[in-house]
Amino acid sequence: MVERIVAAGREVLVTRGYDGASTNRIAAAAGVSPGSLYQYFPDKDAVLTEVLDRYLDAMEARVSRAFLDSVAVAGPGAGTTTTAVRATLEALLDTFSEEPDLLRVIVEQLPRSPGGRRAAFAGRIDDLVTTVLLTHGAGSTDAARAAAWTVVRTVEHLTTGYVLERPGFARAVVVDELTALVAGYLDARLSGGRVASDGPS
Amino acid sequence: MVERIVAAGREVLVTRGYDGASTNRIAAAAGVSPGSLYQYFPDKDAVLTEVLDRYLDAMEARVSRAFLDSVAVAGPGAGTTTTAVRATLEALLDTFSEEPDLLRVIVEQLPRSPGGRRAAFAGRIDDLVTTVLLTHGAGSTDAARAAAWTVVRTVEHLTTGYVLERPGFARAVVVDELTALVAGYLDARLSGGRVASDGPS
Amino acid sequence: MVERIVAAGREVLVTRGYDGASTNRIAAAAGVSPGSLYQYFPDKDAVLTEVLDRYLDAMEARVSRAFLDSVAVAGPGAGTTTTAVRATLEALLDTFSEEPDLLRVIVEQLPRSPGGRRAAFAGRIDDLVTTVLLTHGAGSTDAARAAAWTVVRTVEHLTTGYVLERPGFARAVVVDELTALVAGYLDARLSGGRVASDGPS
Amino acid sequence: MVERIVAAGREVLVTRGYDGASTNRIAAAAGVSPGSLYQYFPDKDAVLTEVLDRYLDAMEARVSRAFLDSVAVAGPGAGTTTTAVRATLEALLDTFSEEPDLLRVIVEQLPRSPGGRRAAFAGRIDDLVTTVLLTHGAGSTDAARAAAWTVVRTVEHLTTGYVLERPGFARAVVVDELTALVAGYLDARLSGGRVASDGPS
DNA sequence: TATGAATGAGCTTTCATTCAT
DNA sequence: GATGAATGAAAGCTCATTCAT
């Protein structure tokens, strides 16, 4: 039953948008009475939060996996960073392209309500990337955190942006550009040990 | 009269959020009757769209200016890109920090309603940057457009993100990181003539 | 319009009771849309409070008047207390008998909600009676207050009780009994100067 | 099972008030399913009526007992009435003070629902007092009934009123005042044989 | 043109009651 | 008997919009 309601919530969210996602509409879409909804969720927000949480949890698992796999596969040696970044990007684009409608609602309409869910999500990805950067000679923890923050937001925003905007160029182009952007940055940051806190560049 | 309504719309938007921005509330804040509002705007969304448009127009003017000034000041020579990028970033952070409350509402709550306003805004910045990149040896138009798209979204998202998130590190750090990220990318893209459309890297 | 709503509130209160006095029902009875109700009253309770307040204000005016008139008419001399009490009782029974349906709802169903309205009403009558008792040699203020509290509640409860219960005896009987009850008490309290604070008798 | 439900009903009534006494809440407090409740009671009101009935039955037993005991103890002779009235009042105040929370809900919130339960209760006390008055020379049955009605309502209302209102004077004061009020009245009614219907109206 | 009272559909939520298990 | 999931009507209230003045 929870399943039906969450599924209905997702469906209504996608088809009618956040403002159209009324409890009555969700209940109707679930083939359930409005009252029943409140036996499984304390209020309307809880339903949408559950939809969001499931999406974010799935995303986090896949993104983490893709990232760690890419790092592992790339191994040590020249071109390593580029290879890992490219693999991660491909995986992210694959993932985000799967449910673009839901992605759109979440990116465009959901940021506001549910308390920091998306921030928490991003924060965990930050931590993961920070850790990996530190194991690859990123210098101080602060430097790694700043670099992670920078890279994670960049990659998240541009990959989702590409999927949602569908600008006029091919996916391969985005992958190339993003790879250049990120790998160049990371190579400079990692190899030289030159880090943000070293000064105003 | 339109002025009063738009100003009231902005005020209510900032103080009560998107969901609190009812027509009655906006009319009251404007010292105007609800009916009058409908003589200048077809519906509620039109008011908020106007608020958004004005903000975006002001932003566009300032961002364009900052960017062009930075490019002009940097002039030709070594370290040019870095200098221009850094100057642009500083100007953007200054600009976005001025009305963070309104910025927050627009970034977090307004994306949903108005048809493509923000996309159009970003598109015009894209064009501007594309042009400048072309005059600096960016190769093909397609390559320049892809690079502009990449850079503009990165810079926009990370500068607003820093202002709104206030992560745990200093503004100078963000400027350093973003400068390294973007300048490194552009230098590679511009000097080598190596561009996205050249192939899968 | 306020009049229509208050009148409708009173009507619905009388015909459907407190629990049946829904906003929709009141609005319908007033020939008004539910929304209109909220242009004149902040919430449902405010409507019912207004109904109650008007009733209590009218009651207070009439009760005070009746009491003071009775005291004045009786003048000094033997049998004075009896005359004054009897006159007051007659006036009260007249007053309460006028809108017995509304009286019933107020006495039986309304005590709970609106913040101390009825207590405040009774308190003011207490003050009035206390004052009169003091001017007739009631001894200490404390004694007068205790006597007033006692007498006011007794008279209020028994007169309304008679109107609402319609027990099996004539109105004249109630007047006689209550007169005997109250006048006897007051005579003992006033003349002898024996007052409550003298001790446990 | 009925016991558990009634006990839960009382508890919920006291802790959440009449409006908070929903069937679900009562069932939960009883550790019973909502469905089970309907196997022992036809509807929600029946549960609350049962709570009320039990309270009233207990009250009736104690009040009758206190009254009869007081009459018996007082015995014949001067001051008898005063002694009996005072003893009864003390007993009533003791009784009502035991569960003031429940008393409050019943007096302030329950009058509205249940059909005439409280009237029946008062009627039985009336009968009892009528009988005693008749055995003490109250004259005609009608006179005794009128006197009983008067005295019972007065005593009931003022004793509960004192417990619930907690006005600013000591319990001893209320006892004194009420004793003076009631004993004076009864002495006049009993000794003189003068009864209501004899009087100047 | 400006008003602002009036609208009424729609919102979220509660709850007495039922009924298949 | 006992359950508790399911119901659905109804509650109080909001708000974008209209229209007679």
Image: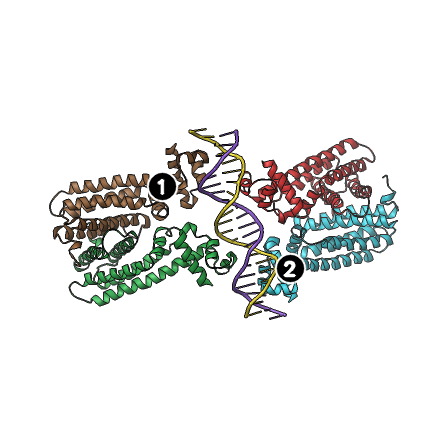
Chain colours: A green, B brown, C red, D cyan, E yellow, F purple
Q: Chain letter for mark 1, please.
A: B
- Coordinates of residue D71 in the picture (x, y in percent): 81, 56
Q: Relative to residue C158, is residue D10 drawn left or right?
A: left
Q: Residues within 10 Å of mark 1 (few under 14, many from 20)?
A: some
Q: In the rendered image, which quarter is residue A162 located in?
A: bottom left
Q: Relative to residue D102, is residue C184 drawn left or right?
A: right
Distance from Cα at disc 2 to Cα at disc 1:
54 Å
- Regarding residue A29, the answer to whether it shows in the image is yes
Residue type, numbered disc 2: Asp
**Label for residue B87?**
none
- Coordinates of residue D164 in the picture (x, y in percent): 66, 50
Label 1 residue SS: helix
* Residue identified by numbered label 2: D43
Label 2 residue SS: loop
Task: Note whether C142 is above or below A70 in the view shown.
Answer: above
Q: Relative to residue A95, is residue D198 drawn left or right?
A: right
Front one among C97 and C156: C97
Residue type, numbered disc 1: Thr
* Residue identified by numbered label 1: B49
Q: In the rendered image, which quarter is residue A137 located in?
A: bottom left
Q: Nearer the viewer, mark 2 or mark 1?
A: 1
